[in-house]
Image (cartoon, rainbow, N blue to C red):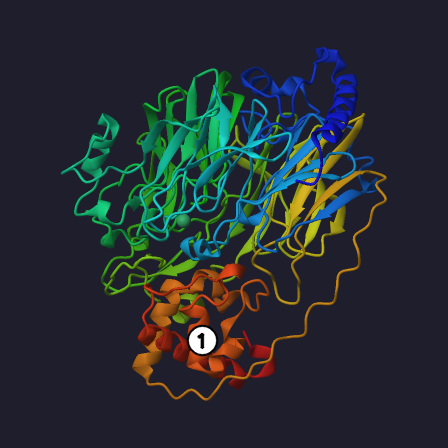
Amino acid sequence: MTMSWSWLATVLVAAAVGASATAGAQGSRSITAAAAVAEGRLTAADREPDQWMSVGRTHDEQRFSPLNQLTTQNVSRLGLAWFADFDTNRGQESTPLAIDGVLYVSTAWSKVKAFEGRTGQLLWAFDPKVPGQFAGRGCCDVVNRGLAAWNGKIYVSTYDGRLIALDAKTGRTVWETLTLDHGKPVTSTGAPRAFKGKVVIGNAGGEFGVRGYLSAYDAETGKLDWRFYTVPGNPADTHDVAALQAAAKTWSGDWWVLGGGAAVWDGIAYDPGLNLVYFGTGNGSPWNREYRGSGGGDNLFVASIVAVNAETGEYAWHYQETPGEQWDFDSTSPIMLADLRIGGKARRVVLHPSKNGFFYVLDAKSGKVVSARNYVPTTWASRIDLKTGKPVINPAARYDLTGKAFIVQPGGQGAHSWHPSSYDPQTGLVYFSAIETSTAFTAAPTFKPAMMAANTGLGAAANADELYAKSDAPRTARSKLVAWDPVKQKEAWRTQTLGTIGGGTLSTAGGLVFQGTTPGRFVAYDAKSGKELWSMEAQTGVVAAPGSYEIDGVQYVAEEVGYGLVQFGQSNHSRLLVFKLDGTASLPPAPPPPPPPVLNPPPSTASKETIEAGRQQFANHCATCHDTSYANRLVFPDLRYSPMLGAQDAFNAIVLDGGLQAAGMASFKGVVSADEAAQIRAYLIERANQLKAAPAGQRR
Ligand code: CA
């Protein structure tokens, strides 16, 4: 804790004076405590356009700021107001909360910081001290996607699955509760949502093998209120509710052994009018449905949007976007709610650009699909049949155990993932990153699940080169910013390729859309035309979604920067950047990228069989962080360059004995045997020698 309450009180009083001046049309309010938000303020968030009180700004999660000081005319004058360096260089995926003059920010490793919103003065910092060992339990870095606020408290869900309530004034823990089973490879990365005195949060881990659920806790005490499982349990000893007993009919075999998947790791939205909570569920686990006892069934509620009663957690409806899912098509991307006129009728709808490449409009009350259209090429399904509500799936895309590979578009990375979308009611358009990508899917001939391993049941397609030679599918992901009309189900505009993954977006009433890029720019576009109006070099990849707030009549835009997966030749500088008109702060010059790593492997002497065994072990345990297809990563090293390849002892000191655990490289003791560690090293030595032998221009 870096400051006293009296200092903060001064800040808050000053902020309150400024805030009430700008929100005067709606009447003044008195600030009696930090983060004094509850049902009334959150439900009427549009009456306080200067605030950003929940991760998606309003319960509708449209990420549209009604502030209009920044416009298409003046955004060229946007400058840095202040910035704050983070004490972690892992991926930053969170949108700050801005409440009564204070910015609350979560970072990688589930750390939380509070800043004075005008100056960037650090008010307090909280580190939940997530054990480094947990880094090995998730697929995609130790990220955190945001916070919730309720009645003077700030809530964070930590990577190791603790839901923690912090005193918004001091950052001290009020209560803490474990939401996960630490005996399972399960993590938590999403933002909690608060409503009706409850805080809800899900879990992650569908790549490793878990059973998904959403839990609601009492916001004051941390006591579990209700929990909704997304996959039926073992029918022999289940206490499942009726909806799950019905869902069990869409499964066969022993799906519960690996959990079935459907992790609720990101999108959640609350509708106070309908008293429903909506959430997206992840992929089936393992990916290859032949290995999860699917029996060719739909496997409910995998890859679905589910709605439950907000008070009780009781099932209301579900819509399954990808029946019998087997391509890592999580339905977890952020969910937005909107009131639209469709076919001359006012409709309350759920808007969902899904990872499977289709944009869905669902009726918010019934879950019935109103319309759906693909926004990227989709080879797994040609269209959504609105009569049945189901996709018309291409049977060839259903890779089975016969060993045939198929190029699926979009690929496992998906056409759109956790990167939040925004909806501008003025243009009627949804702005989101659309990724053209593909994967040559094929089944592993045999599959044995392992703890702390990517349990996908996929194999390597031996004929991938041949298949791609006959296909126009992109092998490298290309992300574009797309403006989509959800009423017409039609694209209004799209940018050129901006990188491999596009960042989350913010729309503002000044006619602007803000988005970051993985190559490291933060950009403002004209929301109507897609014309680029302003940009700045962020010195690092940008993937988080920005937010906007106002203090003393000045509009700010706040954006976390820092991309855990670093591109070649780029360093990672994780920071919070805050902008305003005519801001004059400047970043220190970026240090030159570190010199290229030295490739110095010992000769490759292992047998073909050992190298192949090592390839499989690497795919299961290492590739999610150390995959080499992204070229050099400076946060997750390309292990072909590792000096540890020189000696098995040195290699084991890290892989088995946890020598770099504090830095987030988990010990794989008990997961990988000493023999398997030797196989992995043999595989990496072989790969390193292949790289060394390649002509300089073709090294990848
Ligand atoms: Ca997934």
Please state which of residues 615 and 467 is positioned toward the viewer in this rendering.
615
Examine the rendered structure and indicate whether residue 641 appears above or below residue 380.
below
Question: In the image, is 483 to the left or to the right of 270?
Answer: right
Element at badge 1? Answer: helix
The residue that appears at 48% across and 68% down in the rendered structure is 659
Q: Residues within 10 Å of mark 1 (few under 14, many from 20)?
A: many
Q: Residue at x 35, y 79 (%)?
A: 611
Q: Is residue 545 visible?
A: no
Q: Amino acid at mark 1?
A: Phe
Q: Position of residue 326 (x, y in %)?
A: 32, 50
- Which quadrant, please, contains the C terminus? bottom right
Asked whether residue 252 is in view, the answer is yes
Which residue reaches farthest left? 236
* Residue lying at 29% horizontally and 57% vertically, measured from the top left: 399
Q: State which quadrant residue 364 falls in.
A: top left
Q: List x then y, in percent, for residue 332.
A: 44, 40
Disc 1: which residue: 651
In the image, taking residue 415 as reference, residue 300 lies left or right, namely left
Residue at 64% x, 41% y: name it.
125
Task: Look at the image and tell me in which quarter the N terminus lies.
Answer: top right
- In terms of image quadrants, where is residue 428? top right
